[in-house]
Image (spheres, rainbow, N blue to C red):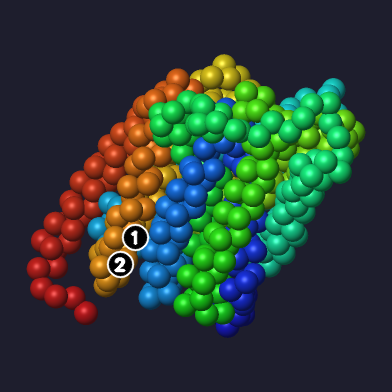
């Protein structure tokens, strides 16, 4: 493919298409399923956690999109980290992202397989995982055009599912349809914030998970016709997501007591369970599959893109950037699929709690990269006082979410596992930094004069 064709393909998105893409690759199982656990932890006050997470996410994307507007770079957030702080930052940021997303994708494929067995209980999990993996690879190999169209279609389907819940919930609240028990509005402070401030603090991390995916949106900003429209696309996307999340979760906690929610069922299925609508479990199971596959495919695009730029810049073996007949270098696909396969096998073999700690750690590692994005903006952009305050608040909200994991038994081990992952990547970064400095000194000895 010629350079001109590539350029036309890369910069053809309009800002509203990027917004819809962002909605598509963000609404996933973290919201459709993970929000139940968040409600169980905090109660109806979880709505405040979602608003805080939305504000923090907006500040991160604002910084990322403004760096993209100033100087679009192929590697997105990791390239800005490298430009701001040096090669070590680009290397560590890229590999932290790759490791975390591969682990998360493994858990997504496992979850998709479990959801699929709702209809086909006798088919082994690994068969479903293989099917979803092949489908995801096919989308990536066909190219960005198909990925964008697919994410837009899936975004509409996911929004339609939430809209259907909103309509049914409204009919129930206004007494148009009747269930087995009356609507249970939270009508006291204890009902609204049953676990106190600590419960709210512990739940903020799950609200942030529901907004995960802005790194991919940053990579896709390169495909805009006008990269300067990236901030506008992000504003519309995050406003839409916040409205959808707060409205739907707000209705769910109005309909049933927070005691009724659990980590294994969607809050929407739980809220509508009393109305005996036979299609609801099937409809929302399909929605979970759509949501999971959508975010998995977007993540697959993200990790392959980052791995290619790591290869191009010498922060990974050069074969990861070697372009063949495929749209994605073969070795990049091979190493990514091996990583995902190992993650799926771990999910099937390891005890549930241990693998849950690993994937929690992977989610935390993504948030560590968000802090890196905010830090990079301070070096790359000429920030006004307003932006300095915004980005400092964004980092503070992320730290609140991360520190909140220390106060809940199910999240605490994941925090320490994430530190272990960071320690391993940190040691590798130190080793590589030593090698880079050694090569620089050798080059200075061989070529003590300026070279052309």
Q: Where is residue 175 shown, x and y percent of the image? A: 83, 41
The residue positioned 68% from the left and 50% from the top of the image is: 294
* 154 versus 16 height, above or below: above
Establish if 450 lies above or below 288.
Answer: below
Observer-nearest of 56 and 219: 56
Q: Is residue 436 above or below residue 236?
A: above
Is residue 246 left or right of 203 when viewed as pictured? Answer: right
Q: Residue at x 44, y 28 (%)?
A: 196
Quarter of the image with the N terminus in it: bottom right
Give the farthest residue toward the front.
187
Residue, x 87% and y 39% (percent of image)?
177
Residue lying at the far top of the rendered structure: 351
The answer to whether one can see residue 262 in this image is: no
Tally of numbered tags: 2
CA neighbours of label 1 inside 10 A, class few (<14), some (14 to 19), many (20+) = many
Q: Secondary structure at mark 1?
A: helix
Q: Which mark is residue 386?
A: 2
Image coordinates for residue 13, horizontal then vertical, percent = 62, 74
- For the C terminus, the image quarter is bottom left
- Residue under pointer 1: 390
Position of 450 with respect to 337 (left or right) is left
The 10 Å Cα crowd at callout 2, few under 14, some 14 to 19, many 20 or more, is: few
Q: What is the distance, in whole Å, between disc 1 and disc 2 at their CAs? A: 6 Å
| Residue closest to the far right | 278
Q: Residue at x 73, y 33 (%)?
A: 183
């Amino acid at each position: 493919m010629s350079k001109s064709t590539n350029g036309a393909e890369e910069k053809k998105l309009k800002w509203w298409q990027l917004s819809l893409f962002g909605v598509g690759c963000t609404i996933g199982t973290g919201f459709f399923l993970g929000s139940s656990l968040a409600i169980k932890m905090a109660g109806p006050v979880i709505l405040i956690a979602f608003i805080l997470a939305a504000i923090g996410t907006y500040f991160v994307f604002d910084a990322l999109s403004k760096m993209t507007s100033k100087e679009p770079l192929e590697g997105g957030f990791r390239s800005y980290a490298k430009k701001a702080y040096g090669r070590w930052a680009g290397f560590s940021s890229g590999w932290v992202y790759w490791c975390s997303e591969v682990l998360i994708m493994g858990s997504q494929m496992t979850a998709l397989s479990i959801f699929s067995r709702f209809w086909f209980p006798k088919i082994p999990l690994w068969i479903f995982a293989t099917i979803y993996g092949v489908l995801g690879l096919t989308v990536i190999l066909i190219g960005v055009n198909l990925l964008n169209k697919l994410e837009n279609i899936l975004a509409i389907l996911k929004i339609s599912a939430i809209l259907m819940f909103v309509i049914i919930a409204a009919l129930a609240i206004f007494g148009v349809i009747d269930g087995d028990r009356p609507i249970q509005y939270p009508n006291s402070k204890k009902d609204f914030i049953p676990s106190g401030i600590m419960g709210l603090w512990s739940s903020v991390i799950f609200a942030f998970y529901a907004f995960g995916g802005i790194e991919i949106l940053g990579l896709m900003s390169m495909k805009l016709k006008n990269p300067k429209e990236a901030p506008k696309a992000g504003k519309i996307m995050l406003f839409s997501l916040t409205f959808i999340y707060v409205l739907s979760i707000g209705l769910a906690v109005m309909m049933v007591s927070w005691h009724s929610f659990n980590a294994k069922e969607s809050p929407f299925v739980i809220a509508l369970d009393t109305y005996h609508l036979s299609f609801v479990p099937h409809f929302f199971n399909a929605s979970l599959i759509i949501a999971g596959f959508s975010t998995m495919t977007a993540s697959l695009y993200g990790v392959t893109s980052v791995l290619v730029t790591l290869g191009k810049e010498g922060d990974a073996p050069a074969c990861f950037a070697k372009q063949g007949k495929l749209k994605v270098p073969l070795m990049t696909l091979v190493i990514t699929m091996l990583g995902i396969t190992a993650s799926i096998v771990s999910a099937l073999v390891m005890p549930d709690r241990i693998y849950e700690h690993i994937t929690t750690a992977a989610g935390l590692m993504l948030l560590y990269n968000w802090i890196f994005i905010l830090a990079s903006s301070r070096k790359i952009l000429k920030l006004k006082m307003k932006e300095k305050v915004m980005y400092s608040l964004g980092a503070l909200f992320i730290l609140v979410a991360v520190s909140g994991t220390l106060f809940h038994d199910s999240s605490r081990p994941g925090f320490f596992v994430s530190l272990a992952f960071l320690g391993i990547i940190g040691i590798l970064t130190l080793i590589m930094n030593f090698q880079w400095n050694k090569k620089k000194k050798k080059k200075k000895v061989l070529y003590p004069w300026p070279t052309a």
